[in-house]
């Protein structure tokens, strides 16, 4: 599925200023290089959520935890999420990993790991099952969504509107997952937009920034960079064009600060950061293998948050974001 260039971008009010949002794909640990399977995963990084929450609260940041079915069936995670929901110090959304989310009516394959590839009725049943489990365990009805593996499909936005969701954050701009059977986001930039004319569903893409001499014409080379690693390496190493997602996973603080400056120079008013919750504990993602890596993870956040403050980019929560978008 190829997502075309949006034509209903949000026009932020002047008082919106420049803002940032931190989102966490809150999920089980599994081998990213192995075939998908329904069982055999763990949730050992769950206790580390509390440390990150305490850390980020010191910066007056209200993160958004997009949680999947493995997390909502973990008692320790439920207790943590119920606490932050009651204190209103974090937002909670839906993160659909089809292979661990009932009903289990599909074969477990790479193609079916993208929820948007499932039959419409099955995608809906899984979405509702997770939404209802969150409501039962935590006491809130989530209205924000991110598809696991960014896997939206032709029926996803219709289903989200049907079930009262007001925001999707499944798009990873300038990335193409079609080679794995997933969506193609090469034509989509990082600016939030409305999926519908009546402003019922807001898309808040993760932020991807291009830097380099070709950054104003990324569409000319983005496809080649996605398909051919050697071309990607050539452009990146020569600094002619670098694709920089705003994440501590595989991106240095120096690169990220550069990307923030480029985004602000291009008048991008909202920056959306993301990472996977297993990165909060050593050994569960390729990005945090050791305790030293974990120290580096938190150092990354310190450096980036200080840079955001220096550039007068303020944190925003989902409620404030929706209010501003609807007022525009």
Image: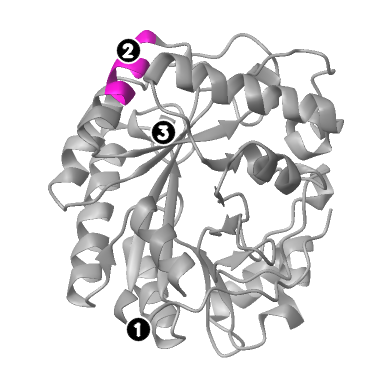
Mark 1 or 3, nearer chain start = 1
- Residue 296 in percent (x, y) is at 26, 47
Q: Which residue is mark 1?
A: 14
> In whole angstroms, how far apart are the C-alphas of marks 1 and 2?
42 Å
Residue placed under numbered mark 2 in the picture? 76
The residue range painted magenta reads: 75-82
How far apart marks 1 and 3 lie (CA) works out to 34 Å
Query: For mark 1, does the 10 Å Cα neighbourhood hold few (<14), some (14 to 19), or many (20 or more) residues?
Result: few
| Lower sequence index among marks 3 and 2 | 2
259 lies left or right of 194 = left
Taking 190 as reference, is 50 left or right? left
Q: Secondary structure at mark 1?
A: helix
Q: Secondary structure at mark 2?
A: helix
Examine the image and state in which quarter residue 200 appears.
Answer: bottom right
Residue 195, magenta (yes or no): no
Decide whether the magenta segment is chiefly helix, strand or loop. Answer: helix
- Residue at the disc numbered 3: 277
- The nearer-to-camera label among 1 and 3 is 1
Q: Which callout, 1 or 2, points to the residue nearer the camera?
A: 1
Q: Residue at x 50, y 22 (%)?
A: 28
Disc on the earlier residue, 1 or 2: 1
Q: Residue at x 50, y 79 (%)?
A: 11
Q: Is residue 77 magenta?
A: yes
Local secondary structure at mark 3: helix
């Amino acid at each position: 599925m190829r997502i075309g260039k949006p034509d209903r971008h949000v026009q932020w009010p002047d008082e919106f200023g420049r803002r940032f949002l931190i989102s966490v794909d809150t999920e089980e640990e599994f081998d990213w290089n192995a075939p998908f399977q329904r069982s055999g995963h763990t949730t050992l990084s769950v206790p580390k959520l509390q440390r990150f929450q305490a850390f980020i609260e010191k910066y007056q940041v209200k993160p958004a935890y997009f949680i999947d079915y493995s997390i909502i069936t973990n008692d320790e995670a439920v207790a943590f999420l119920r606490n932050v929901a009651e204190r209103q110090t974090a937002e909670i959304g839906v993160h659909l990993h089809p292979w661990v989310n009932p009903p289990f009516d599909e074969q477990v394959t790479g193609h079916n790991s993208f929820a948007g590839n499932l039959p419409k009725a099955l995608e809906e049943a899984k979405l509702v099952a997770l939404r209802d489990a969150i409501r039962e365990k935590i006491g809130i009805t989530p209205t924000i969504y991110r598809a696991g593996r960014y896997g939206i499909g032709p029926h996803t936005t219709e289903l989200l509107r049907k079930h009262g969701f007001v925001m999707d954050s499944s798009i990873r701009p300038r990335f193409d997952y079609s080679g794995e059977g997933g969506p193609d986001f090469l034509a989509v930039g990082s600016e939030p937009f409305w999926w519908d004319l009546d402003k019922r569903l807001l898309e808040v893409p993760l932020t991807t920034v291009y830097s380099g001499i070709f950054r104003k014409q990324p569409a000319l080379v983005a496809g080649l960079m996605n398909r051919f690693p050697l071309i990607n390496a050539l452009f990146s190493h020569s600094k002619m064009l670098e694709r920089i997602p705003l994440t501590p996973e595989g991106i240095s603080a120096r690169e990220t600060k550069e990307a923030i400056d480029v985004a602000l120079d291009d008048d991008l008013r909202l920056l959306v950061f993301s990472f996977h919750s297993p990165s909060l504990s050593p050994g569960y993602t390729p990005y945090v293998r050791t305790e030293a890596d974990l120290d580096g993870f938190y150092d990354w956040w310190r450096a980036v948050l200080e840079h955001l403050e220096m550039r007068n980019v303020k944190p925003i929560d989902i409620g404030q974001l929706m209010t501003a978008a609807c007022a525009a």
